Amino acid sequence: MSETLHQDVAALSFEAALAELDAIVKKLEGGQAKLEDAIADYERGALLRRHCEAKLAEAEQKVQAIVAGPGGAAAGLRDLD
């Protein structure tokens, strides 16, 4: 995979990457692409998936920091069990 391809995906927002990934999945499910194109699409889809997973993990860490931080949401929550 080329460095340009990685940089291109890294520049995408989560929403843009997810939309492109969805389009690639639909295209591959259609089965009409040439094998070489399908492999390239699969490769880009794998990059997009990893990018989306990284963005989600980053967002989760931010939420956890907010919740756990001083004055965060956890300070005002009580256990409902």
Image (spheres, helix red, strand yellow):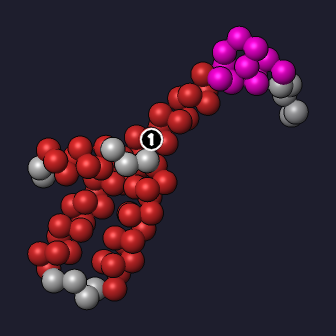
The residue that label 1 is drawn on is 55
71 vs 7: above or below: above
Categorize mark 1 by other alpha carbons within 10 Å: few (<14), some (14-19), many (20+). Answer: some
Q: Name the residue rendered at 38%, 63% in the picture.
A: 21
**Residue at the top extreme, as displayed:** 70
Pick whichever, 20 or 81, lies toward us: 20
Q: Amino acid at mark 1?
A: Lys
* Horizontal side, residue 25 vs residue 56: left or right: left
Q: Name the residue rendered at 11%, 49% in the picture.
A: 2
Pick whichever, 16 or 67, lies toward us: 16
Quarter-wise, where is residue 44 in the image?
bottom left
Quarter-wise, where is residue 3 in the image?
top left
Residue 37 coordinates in the image, percent (x, y): 17, 75
Q: Name the residue rendered at 39%, 71% in the picture.
A: 23
* Horizontal side, residue 66 vs residue 47: left or right: right
Q: Residues in magenta?
A: 66-76
Magenta: main secondary structure: helix
Residue 26 coordinates in the image, percent (x, y): 39, 77
Pick whichever, 41 or 16, lies toward us: 16
